[in-house]
Image (tube, rainbow, N blue to C red):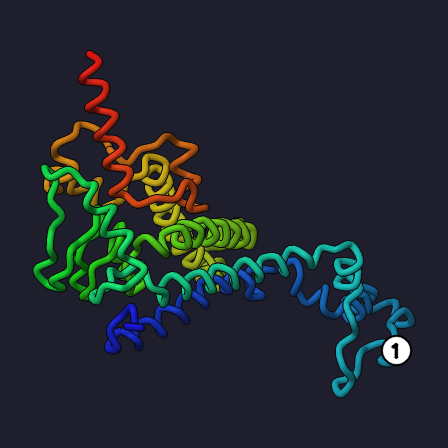
Amino acid sequence: MIPSCPPESADELVFFFFFLLYLNFSPLYPMQWPHQTTPRTLFPDLYSARDTLPTSSCTPTNTPSYSAWPQPHSPPPASPALRQWEEQGELLLPLIFLLLVLGSLLLYLAVSLMDPGYVNIQPQPQEEAKEEQTAMVPQTIPLRRCRYCLVLQPLRARHCRECRRCVRRYDHHCPWMENCVGERNHPLFVAYLALQLVVLLWGLYLAWSGLRFFQPWGLWLRSSGLLFATFLLLSLFSLVAGLLLASHLYLVASNTTTWEFISSHRIAYLRQRPGNPFDRGLIRNLAHFFCGWPSGSWETLWAEEEEEEEGSSQAV
């Protein structure tokens, strides 16, 4: 199988993968969980002994013996707060967060490495039925032959210059994925955007909960400056992911691709009709996009829409 991205982009893909890993796990650093990693929760015996120290030198008899202090060579005492959180099931939330991060990374790898729906250069035996379906396309809309691949492009296919292949139901070429978004990986791409948005919003909430503003400016900058920069970066990525998810959900609901939405005036099979010929309604569009039902080629759907329009015009 031909790889979905050129070999020279492998280093960039690995770098971006670890960059996403850092951004997803950054809200889990101790600075973002101050209520769980403060010295008082980690060393409760030490702080309880310190709190019992006398405030005046007149009562030296109340000073605890040094045996109450933990020895340097001894391990730190177990925090009862952590045990309480474990018993109450509060450690389940960080585990769910880690699973969401792992799921988003797996979806990222799946979308970036899988075949987006390349048009086969050499015709396969199983595509003989598709050739019969392409014959049903009206002669007013002739199928184009790609000037780069020299293959007969099906409806809604387009040649990608970065991947150097024709892609079925071409949506766009994503530079962050280093791959095209097409007929096969578009549902996974939408799922990745949704899961990544959940992770970013969760991390945004954790970063905001760790900020403390009632401090002097210099002290606040030293203690929370990096956390505030992470909060701004997560805010930017959350906004971008939210806008991308909203736009793709709108396109999926209307059975339109990004390329068709932007370049409808240049596409032959869209110029001659006022509306979208592939729109089957919200429920059927979503069912076909995520579940592949009802099945059928775009050429068959085009022919059915053409027959319905001709029948309605004759009835009038």
Q: Is residue 171 visible?
A: no
Say above or below: 306 vs 104: above
Query: In the rendered view, does 151 fall on the left or right side of 117?
Result: left
* View extreme (top): residue: 316
SS type, badge 1: loop
Q: Residue furthest right?
A: 61
Q: From where the camera sits, is residue 109 visible?
A: yes
Q: Quadrant of the C terminus?
A: top left
- Quadrant position of residue 271: top left
Q: Look at the picture and state if 310 lies above or below 64.
A: above
- Identity of the residue drawn at 21% across and 41% down: 136
Identify the residue position indicated by label 1 in the image.
65
Check the picture and name the quadrant holding the N terminus. bottom left
Of residues 138 and 39, the one nearer the viewer is 138
Residue drawn at x 87%, y 80% is: 67
At horizontal 55% and vertical 53% (from top left) the residue drawn is 206
User: Where is residue 285 shown, x and y percent of the image?
Assistant: 38, 37
Q: Quadrant of residue 49?
A: bottom right
Q: Position of residue 3 (x, y in %)?
A: 29, 72
- Residue 173 image offset from top left, x and y in percent: 25, 57
Q: Position of residue 264 (x, y in %)?
A: 16, 39
Residue 239 versus residue 89 in the image, above or below: above
Say which of 301 and 182 sits in front: 301
Residue shown at 75% from the left, 77% from the top: 76
Closest to the observer, 84 or 2: 2
- Of all residues shown, which one is farthest toward the bottom? 73
Quarter of the rendering containing residue 218: bottom left
Give amino acid for label 1. Ser
Q: Give the mark count.
A: 1
> Is 139 left or right of 90, judged from the image as shown?
left
Q: Residues within 10 Å of mark 1 (few under 14, many from 20)?
A: few
